[in-house]
Image (cartoon, helix red, strand yellow):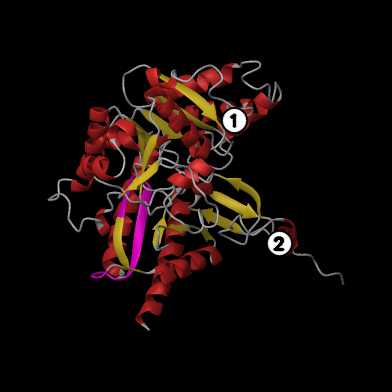
Amino acid sequence: MKTKSDPTKELQALRDRYVPKGPFNASPYFVESAQGAMIRDVSGRELIDFVGGIGVVNAGHCNPRVVAAIKAQADKFIHTCFHIVMYEGYVRVCQKLCEAAPGDHPKMAVLANSGAEAVENAVKIARHATGRQGVIAFENGFHGRTLLTMTLTSKVKPYKFGFGPFAPEVYRIPYAYCYRCPLGLSYPKCGAACADKLEEFFIGNVAAESTACLIVEPVLGEGGFVSPPSLYFQKLSAICKKHGIVFIADEIQTGFGRTGKMFAMEHHGVVPDLICTAKSLAAGMPLSAVVGRKELMDAPQVGGLGGTYGGNPLACAAALAVFESFEQDKLLAKAEKLGRYLSKRFGAWAKKYEIIGEVRGIGPMQALELVTDKKTKAPATTQAKALVKYCVDHGLLILSCGNFGNVIRTLMPLVVTDDQLERGLAILQAGFEEVSKGSKR
């Protein structure tokens, strides 16, 4: 009798032969289909998705509105290049972005392909508009893998190691990581003193008059899902305004409902000069954008911004369907409800499991930082890795993050059903039971 072949093993063999080791893989699976918050692999395994393509499918895998929009657009035209023959989808997406972004000032938007491209364009715009070169980024931040965005990114391994030299005129300051305060202080007594350090930074590192922009994630993504208090961002924004520095919010992972609002900076009452967005903007299609103040966006000369594929018609159709889904399917309300529930559940777990040092986050963008000792806060890196493996082995896709790899993060699609959510949380809790046993041995 002929032995039935294993499609996963066959594909893995091809991956090992033809794809370099550089692109990492968080699981051993190959997807066959996906819907909502569920993935089915080529061998028929059912996987609950708490990763969402790393925050890309907030509106769900194969969102029906998005799929229909892509199919309809594909029947008309797939590409012309916006620079050669314009099309309605591009300008409609820009219109929607300008209407959705915080602030009542005139805005404009430009479209690109990836989050890294959005960041690169935002820096270009800021430099051109100010006539300055310096860029201030933050420790633990992640902004991409291109030369400039890799330079802005803080973590060396694996993102920067061996890839230098890096782009010039990039400066880095500490982020408000309250659980591991770089100043050894505690909020709210400190009054967000770490933000005040920016003024001192201008003395010994880069002059304010030479600084084009400051770029910051409202919640660190790869850096550990750290969410500073509102006062921190309010102070940073005020200092930037005082010195004519462009305040850029990197909302690539936090945008489009991940924190319970369309953009995370809305939680803090801060209106960025420029916002970078991508990931869930088009529910899986490659599309990114920079949206911001009209006078800044319109500063670069004709031909200074753009690219062959930026604002692809299929991606624009998908993005417009995402906006429709947020409006018609009330995804922000679902995000708020999901965030409250996760915070409550994780808070209870923190009391039960000694390994959970802190639960933090905004809305459904939640994190559990694992430590081997709550007093010393020593990172439980090995345990976090074991927890992720346990979950993946039992049908739950989940990721760790943070400089020490000891933070578990949640990025499930906002359309996850109650049953799917409970099944996923049951696997995660069973994983905590398992790693907690191991830590007691």
- Residue reaching furthest left? 189
Q: Note whether residue 295 is visible.
A: yes
For residue 215, side relative to residue 113 (left or right): left
Judging from the image, what secondary structure is the residue with disc 1 in? helix
Quarter of the image with the C terminus in it? bottom left
From the viewer's perspective, is residue 357 above or below residue 101? below
Q: Residue furthest right?
A: 1
Stretch in magenta? 360-376
- Decide whether residue 320 is among the magenta residues: no
Query: How crowded is the residue under tag 2: few (<14 C-alpha within 10 Å), some, or many (20+)?
Result: few
| Residue annotated with mark 2 | 16
Q: Residue at x 29, y 60 (%)?
A: 358
Q: Are marks 2 and 1 in contact (CB under 8 Å)?
A: no
The residue singled out by tag 1 in the image is 315
Judged by its main secondary structure, the magenta piece is strand
Could you tell me which quadrant the N terminus lies in?
bottom right
User: Element under label 2?
Assistant: helix
Instruction: Please identify the quarter of the rendering in which residue 254 is found.
Output: top left
Q: Nearer the viewer, residue 104 or 368?
A: 104
Mark 2: which amino acid? Asp
Amino acid at pointer 1: Ala
Q: Is residue 269 visible?
A: no
- Give percent across and percent down for residue 281: 50, 34
Q: Position of residue 13 (x, y in %)?
A: 74, 63
